[in-house]
Amino acid sequence: MRSKKRITSFDIAEFAGVSQATVSRALRGNPQVCEETRLRVAAAAAALHYTVDKNASNLRSKSTGTLALLFFEDPTPDDSHINPFFLAMLGSITRSCARHGYDLLISFQELGRDWHADFAESKKADGIILLGYGDYLAQTSRLEKLRTQGTRLVSWGAVLPNQPCITIGCDNFHGGQSVTGHLLDQGCRRIAFLGDASEHFPEFQERYRGHLQALHARGVAADTALQVDAESSQHSGKLAAEALLARGAAFDAIFAASDLIAIGALGALSSRGIAVPEDVAVAGFDDIPMAGFVNPPLTTVVQDTGRAGEALVESLLRLIRNEPVASTVLPMRLVVRGSSLWRGAARKARRRAADTAARRRAPDVTPSPRRPRA
């Protein structure tokens, strides 16, 4: 019994009435092929039951057909060492890779290792997506080295001038403005900021700049005693809130640079008997899944992780195809929950309840009626 003839791109070209080169470009998704031709080639391939030999195609194009996603270690309360915010982005990155016909290699990296050298030399993937590279200044030289070696690279983070790689990020500045503006609307005036606001953590720095601008716009003086450095972890947030309390500076709200910091701060406040939001309003940033389930639910800034994952993959693919691509700032959205709401009303209600309880405990000292004069 003779084996069935394997269908090739030349058969598709004859069937569709185009050149073999056009078929090759159309099947690779080359934007130079018009939509009408691409659909005709796709229809011909389907009619002939053509399947792509991915290995042969990759050998011809010197492509692996794979993108690499690098997570970097993060201080977390469990053994994952991955910021839960990035886990939320993983699904959209995976789906986008599949939609474009790419495999995804996921790798966990320790920040202290020469991860950049490993991937530059191994050629395991056509390009790299970076999530969470720690201290920005410490990693800049590594990113620059990768770029000069021709590695296609995109990252999630703050979008800044003259960066060594294409970056997709949230509008951190306006996010900071929105949080502080909301807290001011609730009557707060002494708003603490928990998060490292230096150049080492540019996302936190941008959120702090937005915070300061919102204060200035409302004529509220900023107090440097109300800023405490913290990394994005619950433990660091707890320590930062305890350090803030130890300073003795009055504050009526906390704006934490991440939800993990905010959740740690909630624990520190609770252990001191400080009620949220009655005594201190609290807000975070990121809207990780846990934010809606803590008590009280956390006011925070939503970053569109679905859109972010798609933008990272599509930007990297444009780099791989040598097409123009630029860094992108994605919009944010404030979500208001119980941790910051009705401070004034809640405080008045609490005070009324305390006054009522005090009156009930007090002895009856109602004066007796006066006797008529003789």
Image (spheres, helix red, strand yellow):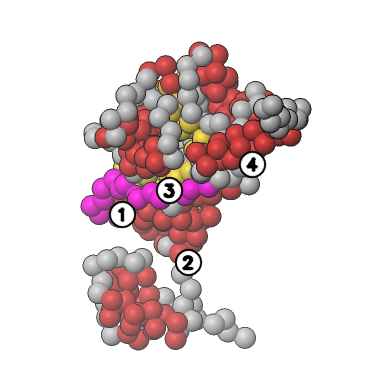
Query: Hey, what amino acid is under mark 2?
Result: Asp
Earlier along the polypeptide chain: callout 4 or callout 1?
Answer: 4
Against 374, residue 298 (above or below) is below
Q: Label 2: which residue?
A: 53
Question: Circles 4 and 2: CB distance less than 8 Å?
Answer: no
Q: Position of residue 370 (x, y in %)?
A: 69, 30
Q: From mark 3 to mark 4, how far is it between C-alphas? A: 19 Å
Question: Circles 1 and 2: CB distance less than 8 Å?
Answer: no
Q: Nearer the viewer, mark 4 or mark 1?
A: 4
Q: Nearer the viewer, mark 3 or mark 2?
A: 3
In this orientation, which residue lies closer to the viewer: 182 or 63?
182
Q: Nearer the viewer, mark 3 or mark 1?
A: 3
Query: Hey, what amino acid is under mark 4?
Result: Asn
In this orientation, which residue lies closer to the viewer: 106 or 136?
136
Kindly identify the residue that appears in the image at 47 percent across and 24 percent down. Answer: 251
Q: Label 1: which residue?
A: 318
Q: Nearer the viewer, mark 4 or mark 2?
A: 4
Kindly identify the residue that appears in the image at 42 percent across and 62 percent down. Answer: 100
Q: Position of residue 359 (x, y in %)?
A: 69, 32
Earlier along the polypeptide chain: callout 1 or callout 2?
Answer: 2
Q: Label 3: which residue?
A: 334
- Residue span colored magenta: 321-337
Q: From mark 3 to mark 1, how far is it between C-alphas? A: 31 Å
Query: Hey, what amino acid is under mark 3?
Result: Leu
Earlier along the polypeptide chain: callout 3 or callout 2?
Answer: 2
Q: Mark 2 falls on what kind of element?
A: loop
Q: Label 4: which residue?
A: 295
Earlier along the polypeptide chain: callout 3 or callout 4?
Answer: 4
